Image (tube, rainbow, N blue to C red):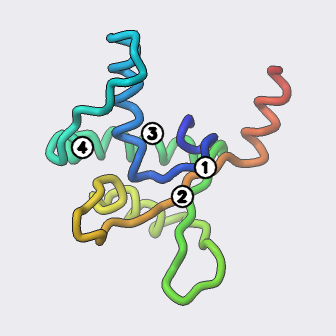
């Protein structure tokens, strides 16, 4: 949810999650994620389920800029699941062949936040 509120990318979720755990443990926000690519790959199924649940609750949406398309394409159904299952959506590659999948909150989430404020 933090990444969606910040309109971040799926590729940053795992490092952000790990960094926040380390911040809580060390009391310092100067500590970054210590996850290597192998550790990230092991976490993908767990986080893919969480993101799918958040989409199912209509709290977040995932989108992608497609080649030749002038606007972002909202991901859903089997395409969304394929993106969530693809390590290139979660792990940054040095050859830049990873996917940049955007995360954003929905109007439903914004309403829930406003109601609890």
**Residue at left offset 39%, top offset 32%:** 17
Of marks 3 and 1, the one in the foreground: 1
Name the residue nearer the viewer: 13 or 19. 19
Which of these two is toward me, 85 or 18? 18
| Spot occupied by residue 31 in the image (x, y as percentages of width and height) | 33, 24
Give percent across and percent down for residue 25. 33, 11
Question: In this picture, is 99 found above or below 52?
Answer: below
Q: Secondary structure at mark 1?
A: loop
Q: Which residue is mark 2?
A: 102
Task: Name the secondary structure under disc 3.
Answer: helix
Look at mark 4 in the image and give the residue it sits on: 40
Distance Cα–Cα, label 4 vs label 2:
18 Å
- How packed mark 2 is, by other alpha carbons closer than 10 Å (few <14, some 14-19, many 20 or more), is many
Judge from the rendering whether residue 43 lies leftward or rightward of residue 8; answer left or right.
left
Instruction: Give coordinates of residue 98: x percent, y percent.
Output: 32, 66
- What mark, if any, has residue 7 been given in the picture? 1
Which class describes the residues within 10 Å of circle 1: few (<14), some (14-19), or many (20+)? some
Using the image, tell me which numbered label, if any, was put on residue 50. 3
Could you say whether the residue bearing mark 4 is in a helix, strand or loop?
helix
Gap between marks 1 and 2 measured at Cα = 7 Å
């Amino acid at each position: 949810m933090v990444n969606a509120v910040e309109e971040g990318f799926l590729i940053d979720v795992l490092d952000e999650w790990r960094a926040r755990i380390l911040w809580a443990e060390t009391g310092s926000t100067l500590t970054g994620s210590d996850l290597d690519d192998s550790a990230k790959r092991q976490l993908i199924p767990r986080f893919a389920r969480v993101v799918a649940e958040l989409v199912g609750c209509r709290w977040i949406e995932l989108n992608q800029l497609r080649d030749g398309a002038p606007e972002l394409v909202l991901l859903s159904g089997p395409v969304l699941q394929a993106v969530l299952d693809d390590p290139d959506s979660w792990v940054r590659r040095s050859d830049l062949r990873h996917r940049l999948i955007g995360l954003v909150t929905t109007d439903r989430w914004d309403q829930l936040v406003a109601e609890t404020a």
